[in-house]
């Protein structure tokens, strides 16, 4: 299990966890090389979709131990909080990631607002590999569920970092300069069924 905090990217063979998804988007790529995830904080404009998707694809290629064949690409978010101008942009954002990954397969989505009804706070999202699919579970997020922290493996866990270069913002991948969440309480996470955004 790896926990993917805001603006982090990570790989794990079987399981990824996303703490505190609110206006964020948990992007999960299921492949023959395990699960790859990105916790996109903000970035709800089309210009940012492409640059973040390109960096995510760069991470996937670097972290994979061999050729990557994808089976499904998921988005888990509160669609109404994401900042989209229309609901169709949910699919369009995921297509931007699919294009960067050169993935023409199935796109799936989970709208957390349809599951965590009446909860105005953020959510914890867990993706577990199940064959060529993912089992998605979620529950309301609580800081109290965080149990232990540790040092990341930079080959499999990095972050996107924005810095000012020559008067312009430039986003790049870098090693995480600190500790990461390594264990949390999973009790209360319930299965969430994804919907089709592309493919059968």
Image (cartoon, rainbow, N blue to C red):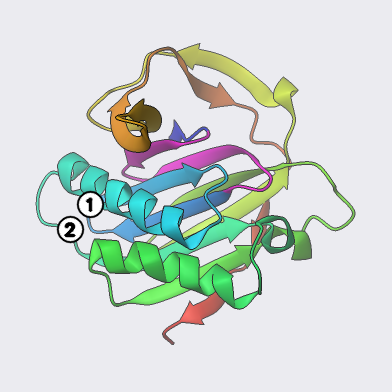
Residue at the image position 53 percent from the left and 79 percent from the top: 196
Residue 77: quarter of image: bottom right
Which residue appears farthest toward the front when viewing the image?
167
Residue denoted by label 1: 33
Residue 156, compared with residue 22, is above or below; it is: above
Residue denoted by label 2: 68
Q: Secondary structure at mark 1?
A: loop
Residue at the image position 38 percent from the left and 27 percent from the top: 163
Q: Are marks 1 and 2 in contact (CB under 8 Å)?
A: yes
Residue at the image position 34 percent from the left and 36 percent from the top: 170
Write the start and end of the magenta stretch as one range: 6-24
| Image location (x, y in percent) of residue 82 | 65, 56
| Image location (x, y in percent) of residue 199 | 41, 84
**Is residue 87 or residue 104 the one in the foreground?**
87
Q: Is residue 144 left or right of residue 160?
A: right
**Is residue 115 or residue 77 the one in the foreground?**
77
Mark 2 or mark 1, which is nearer the start of the sequence? 1
Question: Few, some or many C-alpha atoms within 10 Å of disc 2 (few <14, some 14-19, many ≥20)?
Answer: some
């Amino acid at each position: 299990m790896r926990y993917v905090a805001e603006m982090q990217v990570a790989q794990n063979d079987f399981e990824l966890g996303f703490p505190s998804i609110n206006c964020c988007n948990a992007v999960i790529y299921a492949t023959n090389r395990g699960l790859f995830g990105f916790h996109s904080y903000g970035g709800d404009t089309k210009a940012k979709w492409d640059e973040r998707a390109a960096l995510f694809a760069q991470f996937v290629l670097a972290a994979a131990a061999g050729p990557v064949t994808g089976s499904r690409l998921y988005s888990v978010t509160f669609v109404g909080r994401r900042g989209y101008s229309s609901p169709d942009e949910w699919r369009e954002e995921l297509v931007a990631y699919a294009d960067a990954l050169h993935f023409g397969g199935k796109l799936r989505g989970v709208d957390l607002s349809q599951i965590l009804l009446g909860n105005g706070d953020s959510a914890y999202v867990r993706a577990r590999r199940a064959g060529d699919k993912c089992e998605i579970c979620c529950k309301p997020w609580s800081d109290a569920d965080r149990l232990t922290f540790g040092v990341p493996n930079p080959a499999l866990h990095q972050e996107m970092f924005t810095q000012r270069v020559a008067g312009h913002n430039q986003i790049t991948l870098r090693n995480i300069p600190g500790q990461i969440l390594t264990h949390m309480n999973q009790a209360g996470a319930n299965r969430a069924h994804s919907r089709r955004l592309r493919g059968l």
